[in-house]
Image (tube, helix red, strand yellow):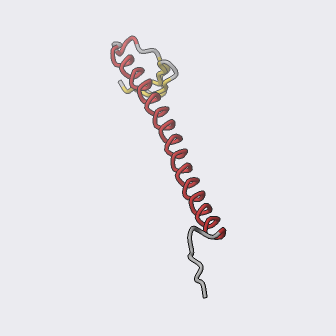
Amino acid sequence: MSKKSKKGFTLIEAIIALSILTIAIFACLQVFALGLKLAKSAKQKTLEIMASQGQIEEALTKPYDQIQGEEILPGLKKIEINNLKTYVAD
């Protein structure tokens, strides 16, 4: 009686291993894509905040009398500087 030595993988073992590897690779790619999306969103928010801060600084450098706006209530003005709308109290 001769014994057959088992060397290598069977076809089913190879298919199962490739399937598991494929699922793992796709999961990693999904995480990578989500990271890129979040980084882009964070960059956009940072740019918006920096633009807003610049507009606020510009408004703060002007004397109060030079700020143009419409009076909403006595002692309260609605102003707009570079499309930034806010309210200022006397």
Kindly identify the residue that appears in the image at 65 percent across and 70 percent down: 12
Q: Residue at x 45, y 28 (%)?
A: 47
Q: Can you tell which quarter of the image residue 57 is in?
A: top left
Measured along the vertical axis of the image, is residue 27 above or below residue 76? below
Q: Is residue 50 left or right of residue 33?
A: left
Pick whichever, 42 or 32, lies toward us: 32
Left or right: 13 as drawn, with respect to 64: right
- Residue extending furthest toward the front: 1
**Number of marks in picture:** 0
Residue 10 drawn at (x, y percent): 63, 70
Residue 87 occupies quadrant: top left
Q: Position of residue 37 (x, y in %)?
A: 53, 41
As rendered, which of 59 and 24 lies closer to the eye? Answer: 24
Q: Nearer the viewer, residue 51 or 43?
A: 43
The residue positioned 41% from the left and 26% from the top of the image is 50
Residue at 51% x, 46% y: name it. Answer: 32
Residue at far top of view: 66
- Point out the image quarter for the C terminus: top left
Residue sitting nearer the eye, 37 or 10: 10
Q: Is residue 90 above or below residue 18?
A: above
Image quadrant occupied by the N terminus: bottom right
Snapshot quadrant of residue 66: top left
**Residue 20 locus on image (x, y percent):** 58, 63
Residue 24 percent coordinates (x, y): 55, 58
